[in-house]
Image (spheres, rainbow, N blue to C red):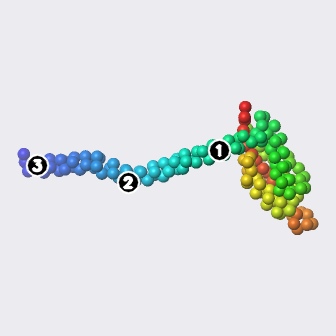
Amino acid sequence: MKKSEKILLTITVIIAVCAIGYIYLIEPNIKSLFGSSTINLRNKKYIEILNRKDEIQKESKRVLSSNYWKGSQQEQLAAFQIYVEKIAKESDVTQVKSILPITSNNNEIIIQLDAECSVSALTKLLLKTSQSDVPIQIKRLQVYSETNDPNVVRIQIEIATVWINTK
């Protein structure tokens, strides 16, 4: 073998050994260093959800076992109107002008509450909706000071809930 062929063979063998070393020794270690952190973060989220499984199941059973959920969408709309009127009265919103349905689509019921109340009653109403057993979302809130009394405001709230077909 010529000297140039021996050098070429040596370089080829060195490159092959380096490639095999990289593939089997270096690359797996790099992947484990950088890949494991994202996998661990994802696993931590799943573990956290798994640890909260009992709490989540308990909460869903509490919400779904409520007497609020009715069979048809019309029944639930009526029940939702009664429920909103009840929490409005509990919040000292005494001058309810109207509670009317706005829309009802496949999975959402929206009603509009028009009333006059004090600012503290409005605050209580918003607090009660946030702490409700029934899932409630305030879609729109308008507050007017159209009365002569500075402590009384006129409110118009669009309140939504989900409709669950229990059949």
For label 2, the crowd category at 10 Å Cα-Cα, with few meaning under 14, some 14 to 19 and many 20 or more, is few
Res 105 visible? no
Res 166 visible? yes
Quarter-of-image position of residue 94: bottom right
Numbered mark located on residue 33 in the image: 2
Quarter-of-image position of residue 50: top right
Numbered mark located on residue 58 in the image: 1
Q: Quick one: 100 or 37, which is closer to the camera? A: 37
Residue for point 25% across, 46% down: 20
Residue 30 in picture, x, y percent from top left: 35, 52
Residue 74 in picture, x, y percent from top left: 81, 37
Q: Residue furthest top?
A: 167
Please state which amino acid type lies under the numbered disc 3: Lys
| Image position of 133 (left or right of 1) | right
Q: CA distance from mark 1 to mark 2?
A: 39 Å
Tags 1 and 2 in contact by the CB under 8 Å rule? Answer: no
Numbered mark located on residue 6 in the image: 3
Residue 27 in picture, x, y percent from top left: 32, 50
